[in-house]
Image (cartoon, rainbow, N blue to C red):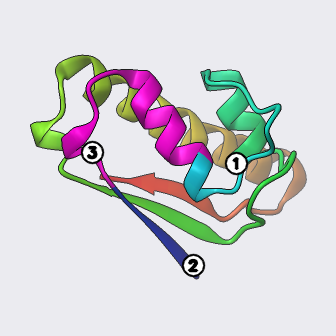
């Protein structure tokens, strides 16, 4: 499984997180910086890296609270979507965010 390592220590805003994530996953230029856009990128496979992969984020404890909360939100939604797809379709979209 491919692992994309990101370092949150220099991030000051959630936009920094989105920019780093989209860059690591080779997101298309049209990809936005929102929960919905990242779900389309990671879970629904609309551009970027194909599964399986893990986004491993270090330095999260050193990031501002706003950034930590956004990372947590995105990671939780990715996991919830995987669970829903497994229940509905019987298949797994092997992507995750770990921190």
Residue 99 visible to an observer of this rendering = yes
Q: Which residue is mark 1?
A: 42
Name the residue: 26% across, 25% down. Answer: 12
Q: Report the residue that reaches farthest toward the bottom.
A: 1
Residue 85 in picture, x, y percent from top left: 78, 47
* Marker disc for residue 2: 2
Is label 3 or label 2 in front? Answer: 3
Q: Which quadrant holds residue 79?
A: top right
The answer to whether residue 76 is visible is no
* Stretch of the chain drawn in magenta: 7-22
**Residue at the spot x=74%, y=63% of the render?**
49
| Image location of residue 94, percent across then percent down | 66, 65
Of all residues, the one furthest to the top in this rendering is 66
Q: Which mark is residue 8?
A: 3
Q: CA distance from mark 3 to mark 2?
A: 19 Å
User: Of the residues under marks 3 and 1, which one precedes in the sequence?
Assistant: 3
Classify residue 19 as left or right of residue 88: left
């Amino acid at each position: 499984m491919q692992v994309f390592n990101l370092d949150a220590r220099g991030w000051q805003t959630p936009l920094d997180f989105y920019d780093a994530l989209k860059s690591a996953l080779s997101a298309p230029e049209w990809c936005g910086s929102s929960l919905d856009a990242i779900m389309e990128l990671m879970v629904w496979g609309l551009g970027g890296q194909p599964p399986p992969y893990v986004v491993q984020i270090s330095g999260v404890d050193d990031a501002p609270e706003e950034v930590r909360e956004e990372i947590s939100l995105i990671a939780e939604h990715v996991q919830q979507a995987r669970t829903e797809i497994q229940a509905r379709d019987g298949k797994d979209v092997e992507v995750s965010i770990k921190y």
